[in-house]
Amino acid sequence: MIKKWLKGKTRGDITFEVLLVILCITVFFIIAYPLYFIVIASVSDSNMVSRGLVTLIPKNMSLYGFGKILGDERIWSGYRNTLIYTLGGTAVNLFFTLPAAYALSRTEFKPRKVLMFLFTFTMFFNGGLIPTYLLYKEVGLIDSMWVFIVPSAVNVYNLIIARSFFETSIPDSLYEAASLDGCSYLKFFIKVALPLSKAVISVIGLYYLVQHWNDFFTGLVYIRDYEKQPLQIVLRDILLSNQANAGGAGSLGDGYGQQFADQIKYGAIIVSTLPILVIYPFLQKYFDKGVMIGAMKG
């Protein structure tokens, strides 16, 4: 196998490929090790972690941190709420973003430049926190699940990616051929454009999914009913209560102290990121293609 690989290559080619492989492996370990360390630290003795004794394998393994997190009833209500906000929000985002992007990609749509300018303007300027809060209060979004969905119905960056995709990947001749058979713009969008847009739908869908899943600020500012709080706020409260117990009563109080504080911290990171990490491999085959196509024309 090595002889087959060396066949027809100069010394310079071999040196370049070897260095490239070494560089790729190095970059992989630089990226992967912090993730691996979080996993082993979440089941290791926190004192040994803080002393730098945990590097490659867990030490004094314990699942206390995960037990403390998953045993808290609040975690399940947080998961439920976040799933509702994430799935519902992503569906609403795609419902509004894709038609808007398709309309703005059509050269015969005369107001598209003005509308694109208005969309882009919102990327750089907004009313600020207090005016936004007062606006949400006036329209009844405070303490409502819709505050996670309606205000972020369209992300301009994702809109630009989708618009660029439609401009570069859906040729005008395709619509002209379909229009000869009596196909309207709406029918063409649903029957032709969307089936050809799996790559960009997957990309912006993943962007929206991660955005909703990681949304911490909305729940912190606009939600007062704890039953409606997302997972990120619930994990924050669990961490804060754990730190208070660790720094105060410690092991004499709730039965755990600083020894288990970091286990809960690292466990919270895994609990909050694992679902996204599980979903990503199924979308990866579309991800690079969709991003590059969307980046061709801005």
Image: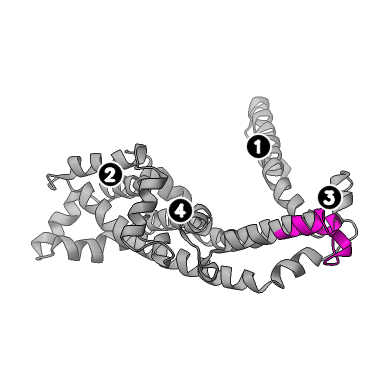
Identify the mark nearer the N-term, 3 or 4: 3
Q: CA distance from mark 1 to mark 4?
A: 44 Å
- The answer to the question of whether label 3 and label 2 lie on touching residues, with beta carbons closer than 8 A, is no
Predominant secondary structure in magenta?
helix
Badge 4 density bin: few <14, some 14–19, many ≥20, Cα 10 Å: some
> Could you give the CA–CA distance between mark 3 and mark 4, rounded to whole angstroms?
32 Å
Tags 1 and 4 touching, CB below 8 Å: no
Amino acid type for the residue under numbered disc 4? Tyr
Find disc 4 in the rendering and name its residue: 207
Q: Position of residue 8 (x, y in %)?
A: 62, 34
Callout 3 secondary element: loop
Question: Disc 2 marks which residue?
Answer: 119
- Give the residue type that dot 1 points to: Lys
Q: Position of residue 170 (x, y in %)?
A: 26, 51
Which contiguous range is marked in magenta? 241-260
Amino acid type shown at disc 3: Leu
Q: Earlier in the sequence, mark 1 or mark 4?
A: 1
240 on left or right of 225: right
**Label 2 to label 1: alpha-carbon separation:** 55 Å
Q: What residue is disc 1 on?
A: 7
Instruction: Give residue 174's quadrant in the image.
Output: bottom left
Kindly check if marks 1 and 3 are in contact, taking CB atoms under 8 A apart as contact: no
Instruction: Say if the magenta span includes residue 297.
Output: no
First in residue order: circle 3 vs circle 2? 3
Which coloring applies here? Answer: one colour
Q: Is residue 154 in view? A: no
Q: Which label is found at residue 56?
A: 3
